[in-house]
Image (cartoon, rainbow, N blue to C red):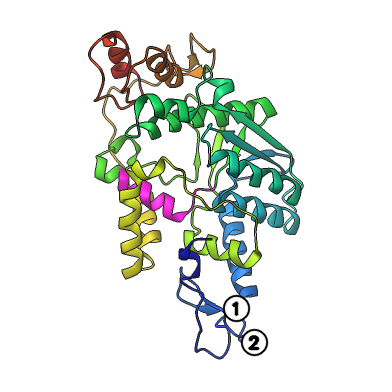
Amino acid sequence: MSGRSTESIRPLSSATCELCHIRKPSLRRPKTGQKICQPCFFHVFETEIHNTITSANLFFRGERVAIGASGGKDSTVLAHVLKVLNERYDYGVGFVLLSIDEGIKGYRDDSLKTVKRNKDQYAMPLEIVSYKELYDDWSMDDIVAQIGNRNNCTYCGVFRRQALDRGAQKLGIKHVVTGHNADDMAETVLMNLLRGDTARLDRCTEIVTQSTDSPVKRSKPLKYAYEKEIVLYAHYKKLDYFSTECVYSPEAFRGTARALIKNLETVRPSAIIDIIRSGETFTLERKRGTVATKLGTCERCGYISSNRICKACVLLEGLNAGRAAVQVNGSEYEPHEGAALHKRLEHLSF
């Protein structure tokens, strides 16, 4: 467990919990600053997630839903809470754990051991889909060995998204829930602002998303849950989760936004929710003459795509050609042996 989880675990002077006024407080809630006891913390944390689920009508009775399970704190807490709420409020939903094996030695192989234990702990079926099976025997270790650390998150993001879709389709499931929390949402808003990514800015805070090139919808039940509270919940509940960060993530631009969010939270704890609320109110004017995207299938792999060749196959073409730099957003590339591929990347709608 990281040091972040102990920030709100300190001796408190209040005689009784500010919510129940019976038990002694054991923590100061990061989201509100309230001094509360463990049972009250569990109750408000779970109830807020339940309210998020019901207000957005995320589930319907009889639905089968896949939980994107990495073995980390977010997906483990998500699986635990969804099991609790499903039983408490009788959602009538069948949950399945869906994990992606990117092929990162010393990270994903260890975290998958945790997911396999979660399978038994929560009595949920588990499906594991690997990059090597889907993408011409490429693992993320292989990809990073070829392209370096700078753009690896571009590859992993495209491959992982499609792998989740394919895993869900294999299970006959059309809905995947992910462990994205409030901190993640606020970071995404800032990232889009800093990059001037107006195409994503006014929809990056949506709790339910479904792109034109995906048959699977995604939702985020932890959208308003603070990362610190997720860690505290996992700590007090003694949940079994894997706490090591991805070995390739320090190079990601998201780390810059994360550091800024943490600094803002220190000064103003409500900053995280404030940024999300601001993102929810963004409405951008669309360019006139925009043509609706037509959905088809990739000529290479047969997967659903809004382009002739899907994003994953374009990236695979670059890898298989031995090119050292291919970006989906398309600014850096090797000029030799790849002019045609670069032009294709420029014209794809991502």
- The residue lying at 65 percent from left, 50 percent from top is 79
Residue 103 vertical placement versus 270 (above, below):
above
Q: Is residue 288 left or right of residue 18?
A: left
> Can I make out residue 69 in this image?
no
- Near mark 1 (Cα within 10 A), the count class, few <14, some 14-19 or many ≥20, is many
- The residue lying at 30 percent from left, 56 percent from top is 260
Q: Which residue is mark 1?
A: 37
Q: Which residue is mark 2?
A: 22
Q: Earlier in the sequence, mark 2 or mark 1?
A: 2
Magenta region: 179-191
- The residue lying at 29 percent from left, 15 percent from top is 342
Residue 208 vertical placement versus 141 (above, below):
below
Residue 184 is situated, as x and y percent measured from the top left of the image, at 43, 50
Residue 274 vertical placement versus 156 (above, below):
below
Residue at disc 2, secondary structure: loop
Find residue 337 and name its label: none
> Can I make out residue 152 in this image?
yes
Taking depth in this image into account, of 286 and 332 the one nearest to the observer is 332
Q: Is residue 272 left or right of residue 107?
A: left
Mark 2 and mark 1: Cα distance apart in space: 9 Å
Say if mark 2 contacts mark 1, CB within 8 Å: yes
Residue 75 is situated, as x and y percent measured from the top left of the image, at 58, 48
- Near mark 2 (Cα within 10 A), the count class, few <14, some 14-19 or many ≥20, is few
Which amino acid lies under the numbered mark 2 shown in the image of this protein?
Answer: Ile
Residue 33 is situated, as x and y percent measured from the top left of the image, at 45, 75
Does the magenta run of residues contain 183? Answer: yes
Q: Is residue 63 left or right of residue 106?
A: right
Instruction: Kindly report the secondary structure that dominates the magenta region of the rendered protein.
Output: helix
Which amino acid lies under the numbered mark 1 shown in the image of this protein?
Answer: Cys
Does the magenta run of residues contain 57? Answer: no
